[in-house]
Image: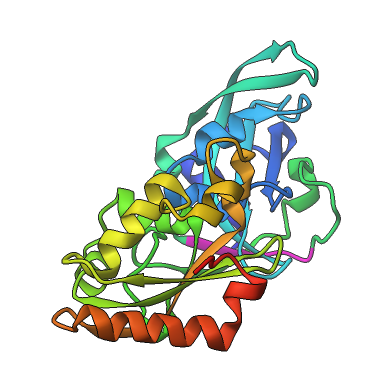
Amino acid sequence: MNLFDLLKLWEPTFSPEQTKVHLARYNGEDHPLDVFIQGGFDVWQSRQSNRNFKLPYVVSLIQAGSPTRWLFAGLFRTMDCVERDGPKPDYIYTLERVPAAEEWVGRLYLSSRYTKRNSYPYGQTLAGDLAVTELLAERLSIGHFPGFKKVNLTKSQLDVVVQQNVDSWRSALSSVKGIYLITDTHTGKLYVGKADGETGIWGRWCTYSTTSHGHNVALKREFGIDAPPEREKDLRFSLLEIADLHAMPGEIDARESHWKEILQTRSHGYNLN
């Protein structure tokens, strides 16, 4: 089954000749899949550096893993475009979602042989090249808690988990204390931290979601109020080990010190003590 054939069924006036396709890829600043899961895709897409959506329809696809795999993010009508002045002029589009296609948003995965760097091809270019390969039972979301050994979150993913208060994550992370690892993917530096409060790892990580730095001195310098906003996108959160909520503070402290020594985060990372 081809996506454009489905779109014609959902929206009878749709045609490839009247369509621009938005192939949403990582742009050096934002991962569109993270933006989509956070619920900010429409606003993110509406801001363009050029007049990319000159035709009546926009088909939005998000790169999902490989260069040829795409997630259907919506069919839109182009309603308006306003040029905004500034050092780098940009364009703010008003894009209206087509209701008939909404049931499939975040559920349809597609395959395409198109690998050119142009992120805004005309509809005719891809009309016969977007085969449906998978249909999810539910719209893509952050997903259920994968198990303590598999936790590896970007800052934006952590924000989604906290802001949406995802039950499986909250239940798991609030049930344990432990030692966690923060990785700065830009510098390669690491920070080893402990969560020994009553709300466990969940409570500690909620603070990181709010502040980016968790009030740690070295992290504050890198990710605090004076840091470029995009720096927080370099953060990843994972777990080194977990402990029972009744574990004694001294035991948690000893394990934190152990991991700092193993990973040399005092001399080569963000730990100052």
Asked if 205 appears above or below 99 in the picture, the reply is below
**Residue 129 placement: quadrant:** bottom right
- Along the horizontal axis of the image, is 207 left or right of 132? left
Where is residue 143? Give x, y as percent.
36, 67
Residue at position x 59%, y 35% in the image: 226
Give percent across and percent down for residue 194.
36, 72
Q: State whether residue 150 is above or below residue 58.
A: below
Quick check: 203 left or right of 130?
left
At 61% across and 60% down in the image, what residue appears? 2
109 inside magenta stretch:
yes
Taking depth in this image into account, of 136 and 147 the one nearest to the observer is 147
Residue bounds of the magenta highlight = 108-113
Residue drawn 37% across and 86% down? 255
What is the chief secondary structure element of the magenta stretch?
A: strand
In this view, the residue farthest toward the front is 273
Front residue of 25/101: it is: 25
Quarter occupied by the N terminus: bottom right
Of residue 89 and residue 94, the one placed in the foreground of this image is: 89
The image shows residue 35, relative to residue 173, as above or below, that is above
Is 68 in front, or is 269? 269
Residue 14 visible to the viewer: no
- Colour scheme employed for the rendering of this structure: rainbow
Q: Where is 18 relative to 230, above or below?
A: above
Q: Is residue 129 visible?
A: yes
Instruction: Pinpoint residue 149: horizontal percent, then vertical percent.
Output: 41, 86
Q: Residue at x 53, y 36 (%)?
A: 225
Q: How many marks?
A: 0
**Percent position (x, y) of residue 178?**
32, 78
